[in-house]
Image (cartoon, helix red, strand yellow):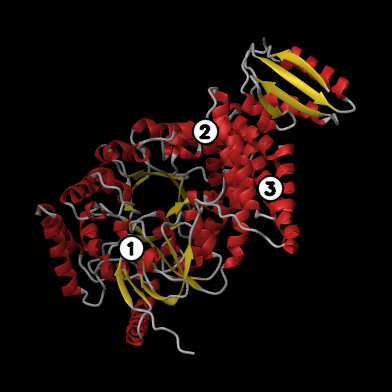
Amino acid sequence: MIEQEVTIRNRAGLHTRPAAAIVKLAARYQSEFFIEKDSFQINGKSIIGVMTLAAEQGSKLLIRFDGSDEKEACDAMVELFESGFGEPP
Amino acid sequence: MEQTIKQEVKLKGIPASPGIAIGPVFLFRKHEPIILMRTIAASEVEQEVERLRSAVARSKKELTKVFEFAEQKLGVEQSKIFEAQLLILEDAILFEVVYERLQRERKNAEYLVKDEMEKYHQIMMTSKDEYARERADDLLDVENRILRNLEEQKLISKIEGTHVIISHNLAAADTLIFSRNDVLAYVTELGGATSHMALLARALKIPAVVGIHQLISLIQPDDQVVVDGYSGAVVLNPTAETLRFYEKKKIQYHAFEDALAPLRDLTPETLDGHRVKLAANIELEEELEFIKMQGAEGIGLYRTESLLIGKEIFPSEDEQYEVYHRIAESVFPNHAIIRTFDIGGDKFIAQAMKENNPFLGWRGIRVMLDKPQIFLDQLRAILRASTLKNLAIMLPMVTSIKEVKLGKQLIGQAKDDLRAQKIPFDENLRLGVMIEVPAAAIIADHIAREVNFLSIGTNDLIQYLLAGDRGNEIVSDLFQEFHPAVIRFLRRIIERGKEGHAWVGMCGQMAGDPLATILLVGLGLNEFSVVPTVLPEIKKIIRSIHYTEAQHVAERVLTMQSEDEIKAFLKHLMKHKFPDIPIG
């Protein structure tokens, strides 16, 4: 099991496009994937779940992977967050 | 085995569509607010899984169409909503859980979908973040779409045999679904006589009665019912005597209608040679044969928004062209007037922007001018279909000259488009305008100079004039065709239309009211466009009077001060001249 803290970098926050990107990326990996915000946890492979997070710019989230490919999955996801989902900062 | 004789109950509603029907009831409930939880048998599970899969697949198909349409025609902002909804529909986890629970708990699909989605919905709705709250609406929309698709499958198989459909209310889309099955009649608790459902029922020649409150509480599943769409009477569990009475009435009315058939080929002309045009209002292509049978001189109003019923996106230019082309061919050499989409803006705006007062809001030509992409599709389609030179365009709910000029500009643009593509059309395509807003009535002379014809839409005009909603059965008494203000307005519109060298017709309900015919002829109306069922009656009246006489009637009526006085006068006149025409 791997945990990592990430920050929302882009101005618009976790709206539909980034949410879709997260879910699409997570689907590539076998590991279970959860996102936690202020002790509220959702399944990161569910777009509805990610949408409920409603995270704005600057918020800190905890991502958690559990499975055989957890390392690769986590690295990839961290990179996605760091890039601000390819959107303006 | 002896069955308990059920009590006969006589009820009275507002007659909405003529005809008499006798048969078993079918109680139609739409959108059950409470989704009932059912346990299903182990053997049914596979079927239920399949039912859910196809409901989801259909929902995806629908949403994809809507998304693409929104992207192309409405812009990126509007389409984003549907993009989000499509993603929700494809949420891996949600459906994984639902299917798993289906197998394990053996509950029905509706319940499980609602239960699972409710959990997310709750969280989103109470979020402090606006984005999350908006997604809550999307979630609900997707949920309703899936539930509707689940239900629709059940609905269509349920109706076997012919029934009288009883419902609290019926949206236009519902009436269409039912009409594909054999329906004897419609009866609803809500509604006024000019509601959309009533219009459709008349078009489909299905008897209908509306406005019987508390009807549903009196109905039981196997009840028999008589529906009299002429008088508005509805009788539950009729006695043998009552049945005989209505069978007789049915025969009488058929005989009356048959007697009018020979009028078909005669011209609508008064005894002293004053000629008017007598055309038909239609909504559906299915009516084309019938209007010919009734002797219509073409179509005075084709309501194109009927092409939108039950659909989420506008039909393409090509799809529309096919329909308009068929109509043009069918009525040739007579003419057909095609009214551009007359819809409320609620088709385009998000939940959050719902108008408080849609009748006074964004609808009719206003919407089309704001959505030129969609408007141009329709204009090009009509132009393409105009090669037989028997079509005309009519613009709804015009309020100002500016709107007419903008409309003409767009028509000009559509013509340029087609010329560039070397597609033929009628260069002299006629243009007309609906006069249904009081302001337009008052400047009718100015408007008339810009167009070829005016058509008076009394349904809405009277609503706006008398401030009464025609669909609201509580104030349906306020809707008075014979209010002196209405008569004065009609006189004004007709005079001013002529000043501006436009002919003036009427496509509202009033044109088809036999009580109004002599008055309207006398006021100088050039064209009557009516529901095809009443065509022969109206023609009979026109052919039996002198124009000079009708003019005197109009002058008399214009001096009267109340609706009661006017109606009494006209009723007396009609009873005297046409004792066998049923005046309501």
Nearer to me, B481 or B136: B136
Disc 2 is attached to a residue of which chain? Answer: B
For disc 2, the marked residue is: B372
Q: Quadrant of residue B420?
A: top right
Tell me residue B42's x, y (percent): 74, 61
Q: Amino acid at mark 3?
A: Val
| Precedes in sequence: disc 1 or disc 3 | 3
Instruction: Determine which of the numbered discs, if any, sits on residue B317 in the image.
Output: none
Q: Residue at x 43, y 35 (%)?
A: B354
Disc 1 is attached to a residue of which chain? Answer: B
Residue B332 shows in the view: no
Instruction: Determine which of the numbered discs, if any, sits on residue B56 in the image.
Output: 3
Instruction: Determine which of the numbered discs, if any, sits on residue B212 in the image.
Output: 1
Extreme residue toward the bottom, this view: B1
Q: Secondary structure at mark 3?
A: helix
| Precedes in sequence: disc 2 or disc 3 | 3
Q: Secondary structure at mark 2?
A: helix
| Precedes in sequence: disc 2 or disc 1 | 1
Tell me residue B93's x, y (percent): 73, 37
Q: Residue at x 25, y 42 (%)?
A: B499
Q: Residue at x 16, y 74 (%)?
A: B576
